[in-house]
Amino acid sequence: MSDPATLTPLRPVVFEIILILSERPAHGYGIMKTLRERPAGRWVLGPGTLYRTLNEMRTLGIIEEAAPESDSEPARRRLYRLTGFGRKVGAAETRRMESLVAQARSASLLEGH
């Protein structure tokens, strides 16, 4: 794999998916539902956009398909999980954003700082 930092900056929706999958594996519908329920609530993705994004993330080695968590999980649902490399990509993006926030604070762009 390449240096995780070379994949940054990430598109916001890719980072959101990394955050979701860092908590637990999920299938596509579960990811869409969680995106809608997040506090920002601005991610309403159609299935085509979501699955193209998931496929791109899989090709980059950020996520992989996971075995169903139980025998009762429908076989047609693909379960996705974050890879070790994907976790490193998420960490690299987090460090990049932390640096930007620090610069914004230094420039007095944040209220009360």
Image (tube, helix red, strand yellow):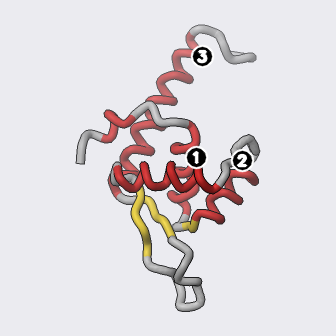
Name the residue: 52% across, 36% down.
Answer: 11
Q: Residue at x 63, y 56 (%)?
A: 47
The furthest residue to the bottom? 71
- Are dots 2 and 1 in contact, CB under 8 Å? no
Residue placed farthest to the left in the image?
A: 1
Drawn side of residue 36 relative to residue 31, left or right: right
Residue 31 percent location from the top left of the image: 62, 59
Mark 2 / mark 1, whichever is N-terminal:
1
Identify the residue position indicated by label 3 in the image. Answer: 105
Q: Looking at numbered disc 1 in the image, what kind of residue is underneath it?
A: Glu
- Across and down, in percent, residue 7 comes to 36, 36
Identify the mark nearer the N-term, 3 or 1: 1
Residue under numbered circle 1: 16
Judge by depth and name the residue closer to the eye, 87 or 44: 44
Q: Real-space Cα distance between discs 2 and 3?
A: 31 Å
- In the picture, the disc for residue 44 is 2
Above or below 84: residue 106: above
In this view, 14 is above or below 72: above
Front residue of this view, candidates 1 and 105: 1
Q: Which kind of residue does numbered mark 2 sit on?
A: Val
Q: Is residue 81 left or right of residue 2?
A: right
Q: Mark 2 against mark 3, which lies toward the viewer?
A: 2
The label nearer to you, 3 versus 1, is: 1
Is residue 28 positioned above or below 106 on the image? Answer: below
Amino acid found under the numbered disc labelled 3:
Arg
- Residue 77 horizontal/vertical position (percent): 56, 75
At 51% from the left edge and 22% from the top edge, which residue is drawn?
Answer: 100
Q: Secondary structure at mark 1?
A: helix
Mark 3: secondary structure: helix
Q: CA distance from mark 2 to mark 1?
A: 12 Å
Out of 42 and 107, give the one closest to the viewer.
42
Q: Earlier in the sequence, mark 2 or mark 3?
A: 2
